[in-house]
Image (cartoon, grey):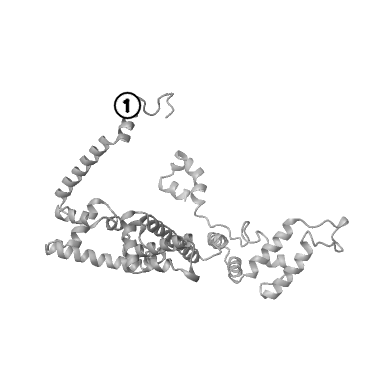
Amino acid sequence: MAARLAARGGPGTAGRCPWLLLLAPLLLAPLLARPAEALVEGLYCGTRDCYEVLGVSRSASKAEIARAYRQLARRYHPDRYRPEPGDGPGGAPPSAEAFLLVATAYETLKDEETRRDYDYMLDHPEEYYSHYYHYYSRRLAPKVDVRVVILVTVCAISVFQYFSWWNSYNKAISYLATVPKYRIQATEIAKEQGLLKKAKEKGKNKKSKEEIRDEEESIIKNIIKSKIDIKGGYQKPQVRDLLLFQVILAPFHLCSYIAWYCRWVYNFSIRGREYGEEERLYLIRRSMKMSQSQFDSLEDHQKETFLKRELWIKENYEVYKQEQDEELKKKLANDPRWKRYRRWMKNEGPGRLTFVDD
């Protein structure tokens, strides 16, 4: 290549550019073929042939390979070593590298796929980088199927979700049972149905005061569960809301959303139809940046107020938002705790030295 460059540049080119002759080996080095070496250091048994290490031929069966390994393991294992005639004076045990080499050869040849890759390396030594890729990809590959790990993880998260939601739901029921409004209503319903009389039976089935109190409390909670629809983060757990079922139903939800979006564009953007109540509430919820569960937890009269004020219209919502901000500022201005905080920020503030205890 350097000779061609010199010839193109004329007879004096080599003399004028001697650096071309110095760079020629570097330019030609990547183009030279790598010497084909079947046994490479760092792969399998290194520069040793695994078949020769075990003393078997390439056509040996699994049983022959296992038998040869057991014999060599008894011979080279440091704990089971017994000196044999010809081992040299003193009968020094072999090094750990010898036993490790035997174990590596057996691990390579006992597996059909690994043995196939090793035989292919012996037959095609020129595919240097391919051998490295197959060796380390098989060596570093996870022992457990990733799909199984993902499935187990999703199931564990779903179980945790389910029990956590039930715990939150029971806490919400216990709290509502202490609110006078709901407790009085539940007690009246229990009296009408005669449930409280059963808890105070006399005679042989007479119960202690603690047992009667616990049973009445359970009756009231059950009535609250059946009569009150709790929404939001404390709603009754549903199996379809678990992560496992959400993952399974993800394609269905995606197709449903695409179909809903296409209907929305066709009905309201192309045909120009008026919004219904459901569509208006959706636009209001999107303007307020609230999730579906948060919006469902609002009272019905609040939603009716939103609809009366036509908050699905952007201009109306901006006015409503400004009114809410002003009302919040007035509440904070009259709040004694907020006044103390502003007074503290004005007089002392963070980062100042003070000897006040509070």
Amino acid type shown at disc 1: Lys
Give the position of the C terminus as an image quadrant: top left
Is residue 270 shown left or right of residue 6? left
Residue 256 visible in the picture: yes
Q: Residues within 10 Å of mark 1 (few under 14, many from 20)?
A: few
Q: Which residue is mark 1?
A: 346
Q: Position of residue 141 (x, y in %)?
A: 54, 62
Query: Residue at the spot x=31%, y=31% of the render?
Result: 342
> Which of 28/209 is in front?
209
> Which of 201/302 is in front?
201
Above or below, comparing residue 263 to residue 307 in the picture = below
Q: Position of residue 140 (x, y in %)?
A: 56, 59
Q: Position of residue 58 (x, y in %)?
A: 66, 72
Query: Residue at the spot x=52%, y=51% of the render?
Result: 29
Residue 49 visible in the picture: no
Above or below, comparing residue 65 to residue 225 in the picture = below
> Which of 134/170 is in front?
170
Q: How many marks?
A: 1
Disc 1 on helix, strand or loop? Answer: helix
Q: Position of residue 66 (x, y in %)?
A: 70, 71
